[in-house]
Amino acid sequence: MRKYALGLTVMLLALLLVGCGTFDPVNKAINKLRPAVPEDPAQDAEGPFTVELSVPKRAGIDETFTLIASLHNLSKTEYELMSRPRVFHYLIVDSLGNRVNTITQVDSAVVRSMGGETDINEFFETRIDRIGTYEIYAVAEFSIKENGKYKSLTYETEHHYIEIGPYS
């Protein structure tokens, strides 16, 4: 009987400890997507921005899929950004190194503010009509206003791969 009571006490104590920890799946997902702030932003040669691209692993032939590109402002500083209407342009390359997408860019400037510790997310739908493995990445081109002058910045995302095949 004593072993039973001791076992029950240990189990209840373990459940109590586990229950005290918080599990918020939304916060966990946001923290996973948002890059960590560098320890010393002054040493970060790239500045306070990072970029990220989300690409599906595979899609069907001529099936529409969505790319999600994000520009993250990791600093607490609010910036005035000048860019095309879309901050990112997307590049899709086949296994031979040939670009397979031609996207016309609007060549007009948009000025917007980007608060500290915020993101700009863009969604881009596309499709590929041939079987194969394709490399996809995005490039963010914009200018930020510092001391009354605009400074041009370019950031390239990691390269991702998508497999196009007879999937439904």
Image (cartoon, grey):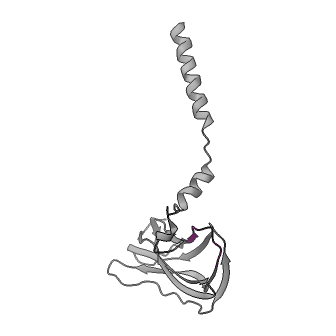
Q: In the image as oriented, which residue stretches furthest toward the bottom? A: 107
Q: Which residues are magenta?
A: 70-79
Q: Is residue 24 left or right of residue 129?
A: right
Residue visible at 56% across and 17% down? 8
Q: Nearer the viewer, residue 165 or 23?
A: 23
Counting from the top left corner in percent of width and height, residue 152 is at 53, 86
Q: Residue at x 56, y 89 (%)?
A: 105
* Quarter assignment of residue 9: top right
**Numbered circles on residues, count:** 0
Q: Quadrant of the N terminus?
A: top right
Q: Hey, which residue is sitting farthest left in the picture?
A: 96
Q: In the drawing, does residue 109 fall left or right of residue 66?
A: right
Front-most of 150 and 167?
Answer: 150
Residue 39 placement, left or right of 109: left
18 relative to 4, above or below: below
Residue 23 location (% of width, % of height): 60, 44
| Rendering coords of residue 156 (x, y %) | 46, 77
Q: Is residue 93 magenta?
A: no
114 or 124: nearer the viewer: 114
x, y percent for residue 154? 49, 81
Which image quarter: residue 111? bottom right
Q: Is residue 49 above or below residue 8?
A: below
Identify the residue at horizontal 54%, vertical 90% (top origin).
104
